[in-house]
């Protein structure tokens, strides 16, 4: 019985992790698009390094002429 509860909680935490990862990915792609950068490239980088990619995108200048 305890093993079933532990397995259910483990699945729950992996589900939370997955949705947080998707939110970081969507946020990274939105920032990249708003700065005129490649959403595909930055999205792929965010798959492996989500927080670092967002920080780098926030620091680099925009390619769009203002």
Image (cartoon, rainbow, N blue to C red):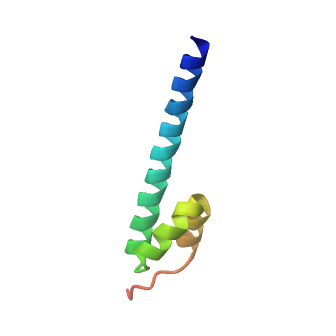
Name, please, the residue furthest toward the bottom: 65
Query: How far across and how far down the image is residue 20, in percent?
Result: 49, 46
Query: How far across and how far down the image is residue 46, in percent?
Result: 53, 64
Disc tally is: 0
Q: Is residue 35 left or right of residue 6?
A: left
Q: Is residue 23 left or right of residue 4?
A: left
- The part of the image, by quadrant, that contains residue 6 is top right
Q: Residue at x 39, y 65 (%)?
A: 30
In the rendered view, would you say 65 is above or below 15? below
- The part of the image, by quadrant, that contains residue 36 is bottom left
Query: How far across and how far down the image is residue 42, in percent?
Result: 49, 72
Query: How far across and how far down the image is residue 18, in percent?
Result: 48, 45
Give 8 or 28, whichever is nearer the viewer. 8
Give 10 or 43, whichever is nearer the viewer. 10
In the rendered view, would you say 25 is above or below 40? above
Name, please, the residue furthest toward the top: 1
Q: Residue at x 56, y 11 (%)?
A: 1
Q: Residue at x 43, y 79 (%)?
A: 38
Q: Residue at x 45, y 45 (%)?
A: 19
Give 23 or 40, whichever is nearer the viewer. 40
- The part of the image, by quadrant, that contains residue 39 is bottom left
């Amino acid at each position: 019985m305890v093993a079933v509860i532990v397995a259910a909680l483990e699945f729950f935490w992996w589900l939370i992790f997955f949705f947080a990862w998707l939110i970081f990915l969507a946020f990274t792609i939105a920032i990249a698009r708003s700065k005129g950068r490649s959403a595909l490239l930055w999205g792929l980088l965010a798959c492996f390094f989500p927080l670092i990619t967002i920080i780098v995108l926030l620091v680099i200048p925009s390619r769009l002429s203002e």
